[in-house]
Amino acid sequence: MLTRNFLLFHMMLFSLLLLLAGCAGQNASEKIYTHLEEAVQLEEDFEQQQEAITDLEREEQQIYSEIIELGMDEFDKIVNLSDQAIEIIEERRKLIDKEKESIKKSEETFLQIEPLLNDLKEEKLQQKGETMFHVMQDRYASYDELHDAYLASLELEKELYEMLKDEDLEQETLTEQINKINDSYKQVLEINDEFNELTIEYNNLKKEFYELAELDVSLEND
């Protein structure tokens, strides 16, 4: 069974000091900044869910390791451990749902910068903002793919543990299911790599946008 090290995404956070005279007096770049940083804050729950999900993955992996060490003379224990693993899968599913809610809220806030991009006076700044916008859109789309692929993997895992509770389970059937799970998580990791790359690209573009806009911002990697 594939050992899963689901890569954690760490959005670049900035320590910000912006000299604004209030929302009503903000220019277009300052309004964009406000929405971008609010989007970052809304993704804090995303990172928290990632840590919890990773802990549950490790817990489930330990249970699976225990199961494969057992013989059929300990079938009752196999059933009990399989039920525990299924409960963990359901917990992971709930955390994934909460994670998606966080990303969705972030996306809704981020999209508010789209009409503001046309209000930017300098062409270079507008181009940088548009590039940043499209990269972030790609990132959100990548997350949707990641979310769906991960849920599909969870369903395959659940099927595996249901199989393990069948005393008549054949080795060929078990092997086939494990191969499906491994292939599924391979896809998850590939999409996750893409998501992380887009995150890095977006963070770099955001930093460049702030510099071009000459915002009075103190930048510090978290």
Image (spheres, helix red, strand yellow):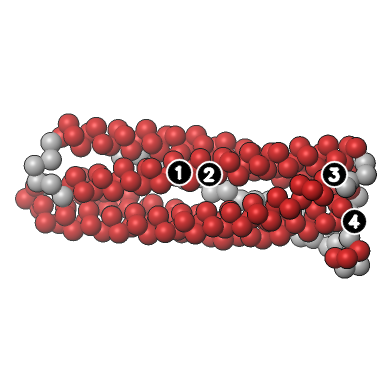
The Cα–Cα distance between marks 2 and 1, rounded to whole angstroms, is 6 Å
Which comes before the other along the chain, label 2 or label 4? Answer: 4
222 relative position to 156: left or right: right
The Cα–Cα distance between marks 2 and 4, rounded to whole angstroms, is 33 Å
Q: Quadrant of the C terminus?
A: bottom right
Residue designated by label 2: 144
Q: Which residue lies furthest to the bottom in this view?
A: 22
Residue designated by label 3: 118
Residue designated by label 4: 27
Q: Which residue is drawn at 30% across and 33% down?
A: 179
Mark 1 residue crowding within 10 angstroms, few (<14) / some (14–19) / many (20+): few
Q: Which residue is drawn at 70% across and 50% down?
A: 111
Mark 3 residue crowding within 10 angstroms, few (<14) / some (14–19) / many (20+): some
Q: Residue at x 28, y 37 (%)?
A: 178
Q: Which mark is residue 138?
A: none
Q: Which amino acid does label 2 sit on?
A: Asp
Residue 157 placement (x, y as % from top left): 30, 45
Which comes before the other along the chain, label 1 or label 3? Answer: 3
